Amino acid sequence: MITGEALNLTRKLVRIESTNPGVGEKNVEEFIKEYLSVPGIRITENEVFDGRRNLIAEITSYQFDKEAPALVLICHMD
């Protein structure tokens, strides 16, 4: 069973209106951006269409082994 922070975060995300067509993913993007706005996470936004952006969050506070593989998570926000 999923509990704690992961469950609370999921509940908050699914309550945000993000239909497409409809309001789109802007509200989800703003929520995620605020949630990840902590020291050690660098956030970059790239507008791909008018009013529609990709959100890139990069963890910067750890020492990385340059030879280690990267982990990339890709998902839709709508």
Image: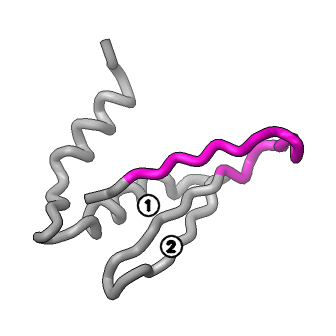
The C terminus - image quarter: bottom left
In 3D space, how far apart are the residues under numbered discs 2 and 1 (Cα atoms)? 9 Å
Q: Secondary structure at mark 2?
A: strand
Q: Position of residue 22 (x, y in %)?
A: 11, 70
Q: Position of residue 32 (x, y in %)?
A: 39, 55
Residue visible at 36% across and 83% down? Answer: 49
Q: Which residues are magenta?
A: 59-75
Q: Position of residue 18 (x, y in %)?
A: 19, 60
- Front residue of 76 and 18: 76
Residue picked out by circle 1? 33
Residue visible at 29% across and 33% down? Answer: 8
The N terminus - image quarter: top left
Mark 2 or 1, nearer chain start:
1
How is colour applied across the structure in the image? one colour
Mark 2, mark 1: which one is toward the viewer?
A: 2
Residue visible at 56% across and 70% down? Answer: 44
**Residue 47 higher or lower than 72, as above or below:** below
- Front residue of 39 and 64: 64
Main SS, magenta region, reads loop
**69 displayed left or right of 16:** right
Q: Position of residue 2 (x, y in %)?
A: 33, 18
Residue visible at 84% across and 43% down? Answer: 63
**Residue 27 higher or lower than 46, as above or below:** above
Local crowd size for mark 2, using a 10 Å CA cut-off: few (<14), some (14–19), many (≥20): few
The residue under label 2 is which amino acid type? Glu
Which quarter of the picture shows residue 53? Answer: bottom left
Looking at the image, which residue sits at the far bottom?
50
The residue under label 1 is which amino acid type? Lys
Residue picked out by circle 2? 45
